[in-house]
Every structure is written in structure tokens, then in C-alpha cells.
Amino acid sequence: MADDDAISADDWAAAMAEQETATAAPAAAAAAAPAAKPADVFKQLTADPAGPVNQRLEMILDIPVTVTVELGRTRIAIKNLLQLAQGSVIELDALAGEPMDVLVNGCLIAQGEVVVVNDKFGIRLTDIITPEERMRSLNK
């Protein structure tokens, strides 16, 4: 266990040193470069609508992803699983009326409520998960 702590401490120190080197180089270059005029800065920030960002986005628009709506979960023993038959009811951990999770490729992106339209089930999104919240959930 002590070896793992030493390795992770060394890795942490190396990462911190690398970050300091990476941030020091642009700062030195910025100090040596002449000050940019505000108009020049805004020219750099304006994007051409048909520019490379939109072209890259166009490339991924047709990629299929798996969207899953999760009603709830439960954990049962194999002996109980084998006793299930047509008409059996499995109790889930979610309460009636609770928002359901909407997952894309296994990652929570929204929550919503069940709706029925023309005899088909759907989900009305009630809460979209922000990118910051998604990053926090990945770090847990």
C-alpha cells in the first residue's frame, strides 16, 4: 500500500511540474509579443459559419448513439429470478412520479417524465444535465 502512495505522489509531482512548464511558456511568449489591439482580438474570435468547426460537426451528425430511458433498478437473487413467469411483477427502486433518467451511451444527460402519444410511450424532458454536472459525476 505504501508503494502505491509513493507512486501516486511521484505521478502527482510530475504532473504538477508539467503543468507549471506548460503555463510558463505561453506566459513568457505573451510578455515578449507586442500587445494585441482589441480589434485584432475580436477578429480572431469571430467564426466563419462555414468554417472548420461546423465542418467537423457535420461529420458526426449521422453517428448513431444509444438512448436509454431508465425506469428504475432492483437487485434480486437468482432463485427469485428463475421463479419469474408471465405476469410477474418486479418492484423497482424508483417511486411513481419520480423523474426517469435519460442516458446516452450509458451517460446521464437528462431526466424526464413518461408521456403517451398515439398509444406510444415517450419521455418529456424536464431537466437537462449541464456539462459541469456530467463532469462532476465522472469524477465520483
Image (cartoon, grey):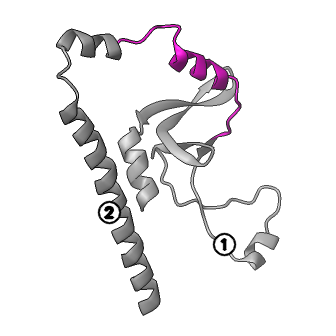
The disc at residue 76 is: 1
Name of the residue lying farthest toward the front: 32
Q: Is residue 122 magenta?
A: no
* In front: label 1 or label 2: 2
Task: Mark 2: give few (<14), some (14-19) or many (20+) Cα within 10 Å.
Answer: few
Spatial distance from mark 1 to mark 2, Cα to Cα? Answer: 46 Å
For disc 2, the marked residue is: 16
The disc at residue 122 is: none
Task: Mark 1: give few (<14), some (14-19) or many (20+) Cα within 10 Å.
Answer: few
Q: Give the range drawn in magenta.
A: 46-67
Q: In which quarter of the image is residue 33?
A: top left
Q: Position of residue 16 (x, y in %)?
A: 32, 62
**Residue 1: in sight, yes or no?**
no
Question: Looking at the picture, does residue 109 appear above or below residue 22?
Answer: above
Query: In the figure, is residue 22 to the left or right of 73?
Result: left
- Disc 2, SS: helix
Question: Looking at the picture, does residue 30 appear above or below residue 54?
Answer: below
Q: Position of residue 36 (x, y in %)?
A: 20, 19
In front of the other: 65 or 32? 32
Location of the N terminus by quadrant is bottom left
In front of the other: 93 or 65? 65
Name of the residue lying farthest toward the bottom: 2
Query: In the figure, is residue 54 to the left or right of 12?
Result: right
Q: Does the magenta stretch include residue 49?
A: yes
In front of the other: 25 or 52? 25
Question: Looking at the picture, does residue 109 appear above or below residue 116?
Answer: below
Location of the C terminus by quadrant is bottom left
